[in-house]
Image (cartoon, helix red, strand yellow):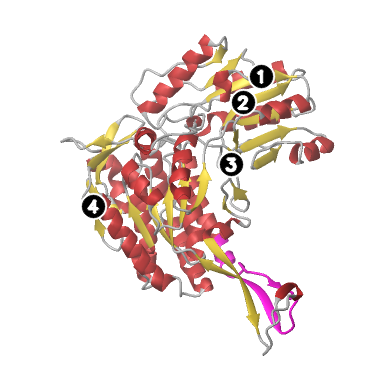
Amino acid sequence: MAAILRTSRTVAYSLIKRTLTFKTPYRAMSSLLIDDPKYSWLKDLGLSADNKGVFHGVWTGSGEVTTSYCPTNNQPIARVTQGSPGDYDSAVKAALEAWQTWCEVPAPQRGEIVRQIGHALREKKTLLGKLESLENGKILPEGEGEVQEFIDICDYAVGLSRMFQGLVLPSERPGHLLLEQWNPLGVVGVITAFNFPVAVFGWNSSIALTCGNVALWKGAPSTPLTSIAVTRVMTSVLEANNMPPAVVSLVCGGADIGTLMAKDERIPLVSFTGSTPVGHIVAQMVTERFGKKILELGGNNAIIVNEDADVDMVVRASLFACVGTAGQRCTTTRRLIVHEKLYDAVLSGLKKAYGQVKMGDPLEPGTLLGPMHSKQGVELYLKAVADVQAQGGKIEVGGKAVDRPGNFVEPTIVTGLPHDAEIVHRETFAPIVYIMKCKSLEEGIQWNNEVKQGLSSSLFTRDISNVFKWIGPKGSDCGLINVNIPTSGAEIGGAFGGEKHTGGGRESGSDAWKQYMRRATCTINCSRELPLAQGIKFE
């Protein structure tokens, strides 16, 4: 989606509400999935029919009562009482108080507590993975894989707790020391999206906590049960270590809570994951108060297939990249740019592979394609298909919503559109891929870079010279540049994020930890003299 360049505060709030908020007000219901013996395992995560959606040392909530639905069958799972503005304020105050204790805990000891959080998540991995499949709709291996990603970043953060450091620099003045000191920011606000309701908070909270910050989380309004269950696991570890449980605080809610967080000067850093239009608005709100921000926004990701590529590898990689998570990853492949010599072979192989994808209940073994997360997602998919046809595209595979309970659509392959067609340049969060024919690697790189987003990109080639061209200054302009692997499935050891309208933020590994701290350059005079820098005399 194109970024919004100007908008009033009233219009901004309205757009945030439409884009971020997917919730259903409470209605009296006689049947919830959590009361079905088939789903009794939900109670092992501390969930019940009615749940409080705010935690800041105690579980509370005085806002709207909403219902979480299962996208596989659109049946209600359980109810959640969201946070009110008053609940949000209480959570911020509790988090600030908790920080007073947490920031003085030695970093290696903080790392040890984060390690224990990873262990507690490991013990609940299967249950949390099942909950994510039930509430989000992604298949069970992906649900469990996302929990594993949180566990992995906890392990990474343990090592980081003994490694992050500043520099000691040479001073030009006799008897002086020049060094860098890194200190925590305070309360880190984390706003996450429905498509990764566990891992993204894991990236942020693990690193933020290790660096001495506390975390205040607003999860997606449509996955509140996952937010609650994860928070329960994390805070149980804090309590076992006699630490203030508000070190990890939670406020479930919609656009009103997100707006409060974005504008709150008590929150020095806001990490936002979501769409580009809403991210643009959040960025304006945070910047207006001179706050820090990490933005993880949209991605119109491409795989370029060079003429020397291994076609079998391309087809296998593209299948997961295009169909996985029902096309609802920010790193999903949405454009397949294929050299004209391999175009027919790739298209034929991918069509055959699509025909073997098993659609169904994401909790069932063997399922590769679950539902879209929401009815709104289905509507966006259908609109995109209609626009494809209106703009002259050909539906090679798929193109229809599936007539069955739940939010299922057919994974779709589109051909016949020019590389710069409006629909091709529009990010549609659905399993639709546009296959285009290029004449050279240089043309493919140009097409890769011409979209507004710059998240993930991949090149399939066997020529090492192409690799260096692709990762160099005239290659891909994305934050993630891959070779002979798909656009999705990034590892936690590298910094994750993108350029241009993707937001420029970096999370997870490498030196992303620096965004969660403030750097001070310290000059210490160990002498009894007062020389000035640059040889200035003031006598």
Pointer 3: what residue? Answer: 489
Q: CA distance from mark 2 to mark 4?
A: 43 Å
Q: Is residue 79 visible?
A: yes
Task: Please name the amino acid that badge 4 sits on.
Answer: Gly
Which is nearer the N-term, disc 4 or disc 1?
4
Q: Is residue 355 visible?
A: no
Whether label 2 touches label 3, CB < 8 Å:
no
Q: Is residue 439 magenta?
A: no
Task: Please name the amino acid that badge 3 sits on.
Answer: Gly
Which label was assigned to residue 436?
Answer: 1
Residue 425 figure quarter:
top right
**Residue for point 61% across, 67% down:** 164
Which is nearer the N-term, disc 2 or disc 3?
2
337 left or right of 5? right
Q: Magenta segment range?
A: 156-180
Which is nearer the N-term, disc 3 or disc 4?
4
User: Which mark is in front, 2 or 3?
Assistant: 2
169 and 491: which is toward the camera: 169
Q: Crowding near pointer 3: few (<14 within 10 Å), some, many (20+)?
A: few
Q: Is residue 171 magenta?
A: yes
Pointer 2: what residue? Answer: 335
Task: Please name the amino acid that badge 2 sits on.
Answer: Arg
Pointer 4: what residue? Answer: 61
Which is nearer the N-term, disc 1 or disc 3?
1
Q: CA distance from mark 1 to mark 3?
A: 23 Å
Residue 13 figure quarter:
top left
Which is nearer the N-term, disc 2 or disc 4?
4
Circle 4 sits in a helix, a strand or a loop, which is it?
A: loop
Q: CA distance from mark 4 to mark 1?
A: 51 Å
129 and 287: which is toward the camera: 287
